[in-house]
Amino acid sequence: MNKNKLKKLTITLEEFSKDFTDEDKRFIETEKKYYYLLSALRKTRNSLGLTQSKLAELSNLPRTTITRVESGSRNATIQTLMTMAKSMGKTIELKLA
């Protein structure tokens, strides 16, 4: 694809989000926080040298649950997230703001 065609297919973030409502923006912020948490769990697992299978064994969860949680394809319960964190010697802190 040549550069001119690519420019026509590309829009700025400002153009993309110009019609977002306040509700849309709040939803996006909430989703970002959730995916940051999932990313932090995966990075922690990797930094500890744990495979998904080993974390599943330590947390007494199916490996497929770990995979789905880390990929974001499963809306994990707080209990599942806390169990994963605890199995890695970590905690999850929640707050109402």
Image: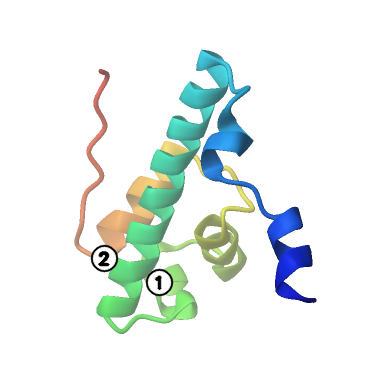
**What percent of the width, then of the height, locates residue 48?**
25, 78
For residue 57, what is the image quadrant? Answer: bottom left
- In the rendered view, would you say 18 is above or below 63? above
Q: Nearer the viewer, residue 21 or 28?
A: 21
- Which amino acid lies under the numbered mark 2 shown in the image of this protein? Met
In the structure shown, which secondary structural element does the residue marked by tag 1 occupy? helix
Instruction: Give the residue displayed 35% in from the left and 60% down from the top.
Output: 41
Mark 2 to mark 1 CA distance (whole Å): 8 Å
Instruction: Give the residue displayed 53% in from the left and 36% down from the top.
Output: 14
Q: How many marks?
A: 2
Among the two numbered marks 2 and 1 on one chain, the one whose residue lies closer to the N terminus: 1
- In the rendered view, would you say 56 is above or below 17? below
| Residue placed under numbered mark 2 in the picture | 88
**What percent of the width, then of the height, locates residue 22?**
51, 15
> Around disc 2, counting alpha carbons within 10 Å, would you say few (fewer than 14), some (14 to 19), or many (20 or more)?
some
Q: Is residue 43 left or right of residue 24?
A: left
Q: Nearer the viewer, residue 69 or 56?
A: 69
- Which amino acid lies under the numbered mark 1 shown in the image of this protein? Leu
| Residue placed under numbered mark 1 in the picture | 55
Quadrant of image for the C terminus: top left
Residue contact at pointers 2 and 1, CB within 8 angstroms: yes
For residue 4, what is the image quadrant? Answer: bottom right
- In the rendered view, would you say 23 is above or below 27? above
> Around disc 1, counting alpha carbons within 10 Å, would you say few (fewer than 14), some (14 to 19), or many (20 or more)?
many
- In the rendered view, would you say 57 is above or below 33? below
Instruction: Give the residue displayed 37% in from the left and 49% down from the top.
Output: 37
Q: Is residue 59 left or right of residue 91?
A: right
**What percent of the width, then of the height, locates residue 90?**
20, 57
**What percent of the width, then of the height, locates residue 70?**
50, 61
Instruction: Give the residue displayed 25% in from the left and 44% down from the top.
Output: 92
